[in-house]
Amino acid sequence: MAVSRPVLITGCSGGGKSTLLAELKGRGHSVIEEPGRRIVAEELTVGGNALPWRDPTAFAERALALAHADLLAASRMSGLVFFDRGLIDAAVALQQACGIAYRTTLGGKRHYAKSVFLAPPWAEIYATDSARRHDLATALAEFERLQRALNRLGYSARLLPKTNVKKRADFVLRTLA
């Protein structure tokens, strides 16, 4: 029977999460890609509306469903499984979009390891693209909502250092050892 240890990496948009996940994958760890970016790519391809800038509620609902499916898939893996965003991000986004409390959406279960890694705002590397259209101020507000939610949900939020990706990955793995 596979025994996985789901680890969430979340935080500020444009804070280097995806780069860190690519480094961890390169070191042989399992990685689950960000639900939001997968949804945006699909919606842009089909001309859909479940986009954060068009219908934030539909986007967050899709992200929740995808994050649940990702957790189920990860439960069949073994070892550390790193998530580029996930269920908590989607629940916080849904609360922001339509007011459904993230505690209601998440229930009482802890879905990830107690230590969650939080990418801080990092203006020097922040950039917009076709999937990230919001500005740094919006990303900062998102970061603050996530940080509050993690603390209220009983997670231990570990701020990722603003350093090169190899040192960031070393920090994550050392913290989890």
Image (spheres, rainbow, N blue to C red):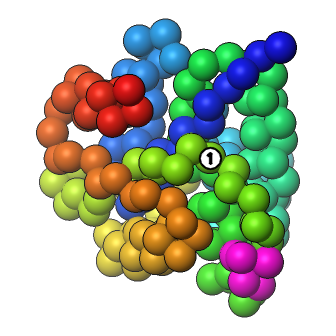
Q: Position of residue 174 (x, y in %)?
A: 30, 28
Query: Main structural element of the magenta stretch: helix, strand or loop?
Result: helix
Q: Position of residue 38 (x, y in %)?
A: 68, 42
- Label 1: which residue? 112
In the displayed structure, does residue 124 sit left or right of residue 11? left
Residue sitting at 84 percent across and 53 percent down? Answer: 65
Asked if residue 86 can be seen in this view, the reply is yes
Tell me the kind of residue under disc 1.
Tyr
Please say whether residue 48 is one of the residues in the magenta stretch. Answer: no
Q: Residue furthest bottom?
A: 99
Q: Position of residue 96 (x, y in %)?
A: 63, 83
Q: Position of residue 160 (x, y in %)?
A: 28, 47
In the displayed structure, does residue 142 sit left or right of residue 19? right
State the image quarter where residue 124 is shown: bottom left
| 174 versus 59 height, above or below | above
Q: What span is colored magenta in the figure?
A: 100-104
Residue sitting at 78 percent across and 29 percent down? Answer: 75
Of the 4 image quadrants, the one containing the C terminus is top left
Q: Nearer the viewer, residue 125 or 108?
A: 108
Residue sitting at 62 percent across and 46 percent down? Answer: 112
Circle 1: element type: loop
State the image quarter where residue 60 is shown: bottom right
Residue sitting at 76 percent across and 67 percent down? Answer: 108
Of the 4 image quadrants, the one containing the N terminus is top right
| 148 versus 25 height, above or below | below
Label 1 neighbourhood size at 10 Å, few (<14), some (14-19), many (20+)? many
| 90 versus 176 height, above or below | below
In the displayed structure, does residue 117 sit left or right of residue 39? left
